[in-house]
Image (cartoon, rainbow, N blue to C red):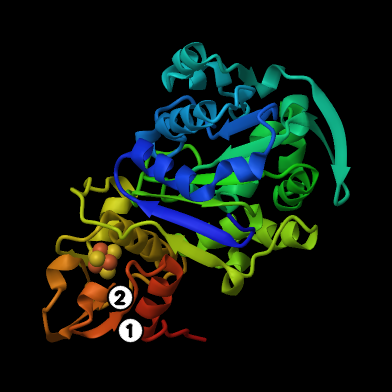
Amino acid sequence: MRENDIIITYGSDASVMTRALLDAIDIESLIGDTNATIVLKPNLVVAVTPEGGATTHPEIVISIIEHLKDRGYHHITIAESAWIGDSTERGFAVNGYHAISGRYGVPLIDVKKDRYVTQSAGGITMEVSKTVLECDFLINLPVLKGHCQTAMTCALKNMKGCISDRSKRQFHTQGLHRPIASLNRVRSADLIIVDSICGDLDFEEGGNPVETNRIFAARDSVLSDAFGASLIGFTEEDIPYIHLAEELGVGSSDLSRMNLISLNEPSQQPLATPTGKAHSLTLHTEERSACSACYGTLIHALKRLDEVGRLKNLKHTISIGQGFKGVEDPKKVGVGSCTQGLGKSLPGCPPKAVDMAEFIKGLEQPPRHHS
Ligand code: SF4
């Protein structure tokens, strides 16, 4: 796997999808020596299970451990810390990590109780987990989801679970973006496997999950986040820590250089009915047998438009799904290649949310400003 590769797979079985990614990655060539110490860093920001859209699916962790052990890698540790106010131990417990630890002989490190090494980068000083800092190979397992303060969280921000609570508090007083970039300058992941199965629409702690049923892998945390941002309707400008990390030499956000490898095509699966805020956004859609990757992406695009006040002027209903294949209707508009017979259609299978948002904006007149 090269530095500018993003490998993506679609499906509903996290174990099968992770194994397919690991086969494509050729992880042995990245890690090398079987004596290497390997740390897996999931997202257990709060003590809840993954269906809520906040935490990493444990099947991803299990599949990686089994894959590595089969290839002779036995020095594997899982390290994480919940956000301030929640217990990492409870997060481990509700997601079955104690059983995983026992079955595979993989220690669990609660970073809140780890030893720290004081490090500085980009003008920010922080206490970083010794376990994470000193490992030979760090695999970051973020959930791609919205965040109420930084708009999005993915690989770069997931590293915040690798510092002391004292440094987390300090990061918040320093505005989060620069500290997150600096932390990744100190230590960023060697491999990122992004859980984008059902990330939350806009909250780090979950509650409004949006099914997109995809997992993707990257080696460059900046590229991973620039790509992730586009999938949920943001540009890099919306998330300042992406460019700040790039300026500190963490990686490249240049999506034109990205080599996107799709292991399979999205397919139609039974869609879970979105709840809460996500459900209100579906009222702007006409869905006929849509793949979850496509439909979830449209929900994120509609959310972005709602945030800038462009949804209340939307006159069109956005068609989406395989049920529109072969339908010719000049009055309808749609997103995704399946809707190419409609009056206006955005190509792509699936298109990115950032492109969907631009397409939908182009359908409507901008709101009039009264002086
Ligand atoms: S364009 Fe059609 S086939 Fe492709 S992801 Fe969307 S709904 Fe599925």
> Which SS class for mark 1?
helix
Neighbour tally class for label 1: few under 14, some 14-19, many 20 plus, Cα within 10 Å: few
| Residue that badge 2 annotates | 314
Residue 110 seen in render:
yes
Q: Name the residue type under label 2.
A: Leu
- Mark nearer the N terminus (2 vs 1): 2
Residue 87 seen in render:
no
In the depicted structure, whether residue 263 falls above or below residue 206: below
The quarter holding residue 76 reads: top right
Residue drawn where x is 32% and y is 52% of the image: 278
Residue 363, disc:
1
Q: Give the farthest residue toward the top.
A: 102
Q: Quadrant of the N terminus?
A: bottom right
In the depicted structure, whether residue 365 falls above or below residue 68: below
Question: Marks 2 and 1: CB-CB under 8 Å?
Answer: yes
The quarter holding residue 108 reads: top right
